[in-house]
Amino acid sequence: MRIAIIIEHVHMRGGQERVVAELVRRLCERHEIHLYCFSAHDVPDDKVHVHRLPCPWRSAMLKSLWLALLTWVVLRPRRFDVVLSQGGNAVNQNWVLVHTCHALRLQAARHEQWAYKHMRPLRVLASELRGRCATLLEGRAVRRCRGRVIAVSAMLRDYLVSQHGLAPEEVAVANNGVDHEVFNERLRERYRRCTRRRLGLQDDEFVVLFVGGRWFDKGLPYLVEALALVNSDRVRLLVVGRGDVELFASLAAAHGVADRVIFEPPTDHVEHYYAAADCLAFPSDAEGCPLVVAEAAASGLPVVTTQVGVAYELVEDGRSGFIVERDAHSIAKSLDRLAADPDLCRAMGHQAHLRSLRFTWDAQAHTIEQLFLTWHQRGKQVLPSAPAAPPASAEPAPSRIRLAAISHSCVLSINQGLY
């Protein structure tokens, strides 16, 4: 097949950029892949046709609108079997891969006191306009491609059904993956001691890790407040990512924990920080399938998170982590339990690692490829939203069906529970 993929940037860092990079590296072995983007890294140049588009804008919203306009001009859909957009970043797609939930983010931002207290009025207005525009484009894209919509988590599928009126059968799910060769329980042996030494962390300190951008949306203010509420002053917060360091440093000082918060810039080797940490805290307001949660779980860290994205698949409350409210007291209570019991912390981390094993990039790519092939083999007809009714003369369907699942993965207790 000839597949065109529309995205602003492609690389092995970040969220949807990483997802598309992993997908392209697998699909290009069997299909002709064309990337329409502003920049592309970490993809095989000899196997992928990269169409680099000019971009004079720095604003994320203007970049998305500019990309939609440019691809509408230069991309001819009839030349391709599949034209895949990332949410609403195009107007001439025939498939959509949805990574985020713009309407939920917009609703959360409207009710988020932290954001409105610390953001200038113009930035608040810009955030509102960006959210509304993204929601409108997202809705247009998924309704245009009914039956050809892919969500990166089941929770995101439910969001598309409730927000944009799609039927559940019109949205396929292909969870994001994890590179288990990089993110695994052996990280501590390799990087824990040297990374802690570089950061000035003591062996007996309990380190809570936060990774990502959009610090307000992902709940960093609640983590700073929770740090002031935990029972032990040996608990440290390690923040890795891009954000307003000066603002959050002053927030930490206001809560009396400035000396217990460490800020680190974005990195290409986040696995070093997973090795140095004891747990991941991620109290986000709305997510599709956050890579950081799956990577931390694969690295053997218990996860303290809100009920977003794949949290309910990776985090069994009290067994592989804790599901918390977006509230400092709820977060502090969970952190206290982990910090006070190292054996419990290690056991939860191991369970989180086991639950992460089914999330692989190969599995996601295979699911997406099969959806494309099925649609292509049917002559590019819209995939049915529900099974067709049998003809009147057909025999009645059996009242009971017996299914045998034969797989070596049945020996794992975690998979038995899923079955």
Image (cartoon, rainbow, N blue to C red):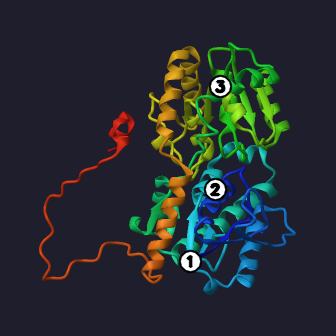
The reply to whether discs 3 and 1 touch (Cβ–Cβ < 8 Å) is no
Q: Position of residue 319 (x, y in %)?
A: 44, 28
| Residue appearing at x 74%, y 34% in the figure | 239
Mark 1 residue type: Asn
Query: Which residue carries the number 3 mark?
Result: 188
Question: Around disc 1, counting alpha carbons within 10 Å, would you say few (fewer than 14), some (14 to 19), or many (20 or more)?
Answer: many
Along the line of sight, which residue is nearer the eye, 189 or 243?
189
Query: Which residue carries the number 2 mark?
Result: 22
Vertical placement of residue 407 versus 375, above or below:
above
Q: CA distance from mark 2 to mark 1?
A: 21 Å
Mark 2 residue type: Glu
The image quarter in which residue 130 lies: bottom right
Q: Mark 3 or mark 1, which has the lower sequence index?
A: 1
Taking the image as shown, residue 172 lies to the left or right of residue 53, namely left
Q: Position of residue 177 (x, y in %)?
A: 56, 49
Question: Around disc 2, counting alpha carbons within 10 Å, would you say few (fewer than 14), some (14 to 19), or many (20 or more)?
Answer: many
- Label for residue 94? 1
Q: CA distance from mark 2 to mark 3?
A: 25 Å
In which quadrant will I find the N terminus? Answer: bottom right
Q: Position of residue 304 (x, y in %)?
A: 56, 33
The reply to whether discs 2 and 1 touch (Cβ–Cβ < 8 Å) is no
Q: Mark 2 or mark 1, which has the lower sequence index?
A: 2
